[in-house]
Image (spheres, rainbow, N blue to C red):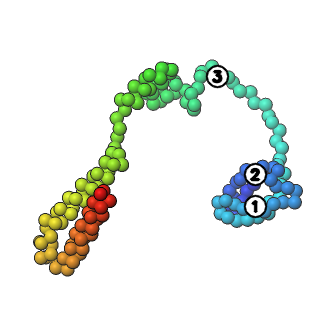
Amino acid sequence: MLINCNSCQKKFVVPDSAIKESGRLVQCSACGSQWKQFPVKEKIYEKKEVKVKKKSKKKRGLYTEEYLKKKHGLVINDSKDSSQNRNFNKNKKKNGLGFYSYILILIIFLFTIFGILNLNKDIIVQNYPATEIYIEYLYEIIDLIKVLILEFIN
């Protein structure tokens, strides 16, 4: 049975046995509105006989091989040899970096930033005296993290 939500007009397929003659309270999963649904009397349409012409050409999915070749210049080779697929997968290069490569790059980047900050600490404090406290706190936190890591390893 096909029912429609009264608010948002979304359609739902419900088994015929789920809704009795006395009706049932249903709720739309899209908008949340509730209503009492009674069985829907479906119209029975007569089936018309339609003659279908059988094509001798074998189709693959939606498009024929001739269409793909003519329209897009694609040639489909129907080979059942799976060794070509294996060779293709072996020759395929992996693009991008892995998770651990990104972590390694992040660590190198952070060490570089902290090294540059350490080299220029005196110049920064001289130009901006209020930053001295924050830079000292930053390096204290880095020392604490280093101690925690060393304790965790040992």
In-image side of 51 versus 83 (left or right): right
Front residue of 95/51: it is 95
Residues at marks 1 and 3, CA–CA distance in whole angstroms: 47 Å
Front residue of 131/1: it is 131
Residue 134 x, y percent position in the rendering:
23, 75
As drawn, the label of residue 55 is: 3
Mark before the other along the chain sequence, 2 or 3: 2
Residues at marks 2 and 1, CA–CA distance in whole angstroms: 10 Å
Q: Nearer the viewer, mark 1 or mark 3?
A: 1
Q: Are marks 2 and 1 in contact (CB under 8 Å)?
A: yes
The image quadrant where one finds the C terminus is: bottom left
Residue 138 x, y percent position in the rendering:
24, 70
Q: Residues within 10 Å of mark 2 (few under 14, many from 20)?
A: few
As drawn, the label of residue 83 is: none
The kind of residue on which mark 3 rests is Lys
Q: Is residue 131 visible?
A: no
Give the residue at x 49% y 28%.
68
For disc 1, the marked residue is 26
User: 143 above or below 21?
Assistant: below
Mark before the other along the chain sequence, 2 or 1: 2
User: 48 above or below 129?
Assistant: above
Q: Nearer the viewer, mark 2 or mark 3?
A: 2
Residue 40 x, y percent position in the rendering:
82, 53
Q: Are marks 2 and 3 in contact (CB under 8 Å)?
A: no
Give the residue at x 72% y 62%.
27
User: 62 above or below 140?
Assistant: above
Front residue of 3/17: it is 17
The kind of residue on which mark 1 rests is Val
**Kind of element beneath mark 1:** strand
Residue 28 x, y percent position in the rendering:
69, 60
**Kind of element beneath mark 3:** loop
As drawn, the label of residue 14 is: 2
